Amino acid sequence: MWTPPKEGETVGRAQRRTMIASTIITAYSAVLFTIFGEWMGLAALSPKSALMVALLIWGAFVVPFVLLDRLYFRMGTRYALLQLVSWMFKISSAALIFSLRT
């Protein structure tokens, strides 16, 4: 996530602002995934079942959003593929760790 400097702002300050926003968003999504995992009972699932849940989450939420970004914002194909792969890795690793925590 990168944002250009605002008028009168240095590049370093813009980068710090971006990193702070990125950290807040990451922490928020981690808390939400933990709540979701408890609600869905991911800890009681086998690792294979947890990966299947991750695949369903990815297909239901990530794929449509990335495709819409690709269409509306004319995002590059390589960037869209990178987003798809990175989100699959993030969601599947989180679900797998969640299922192995017991």
Image (cartoon, grey):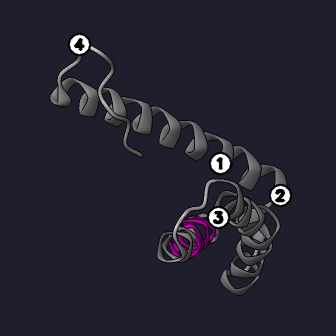
In terms of secondary structure, what is the magenta stretch mainly?
helix
Name which of mark 1 and mark 2 comes first in the sequence: 1
Q: Is residue 69 magenta?
A: no
Q: Residue at x 67, y 42 (%)?
A: 32
Residue 21 is situated, as x and y percent measured from the top left of the image, at: 43, 31
Please give the range of residues in magenta: 84-96
Dot 4 surroundings within 10 Å: few (below 14), some, or many (20 or more)? few
Is residue 25 toward the left or the right of residue 11 in the image?
A: right
Q: Residue under label 3, please give it.
A: 70
Q: Secondary structure at mark 1?
A: helix
Name which of mark 3 and mark 1 comes first in the sequence: 1
Which of discs 4 and 1 lies nearer the camera? The answer is: 4
Which of discs 2 and 3 lies nearer the camera? The answer is: 3
Residue 25 is situated, as x and y percent measured from the top left of the image, at: 52, 37
In this orientation, which residue lies closer to the viewer: 90 or 44? 90
Does 29 sit above or below residue 82?
above
Residue 84 is situated, as x and y percent measured from the top left of the image, at: 59, 73
Q: Secondary structure at mark 4?
A: loop
Q: Quadrant of residue 13?
A: top left
**Residue 40: mark:** 2
The amino acid beneath tag 4 is Gly
Q: Residue at x 33, y 34 (%)?
A: 4
Q: Is residue 91 magenta?
A: yes
Q: Residue under label 4, please give it.
A: 8
Report how far apart the C-alphas of labels 3 and 1 lie in the structure.
29 Å
Name which of mark 4 and mark 3 comes first in the sequence: 4
Is residue 71 toward the left or the right of residue 28 in the image?
A: right
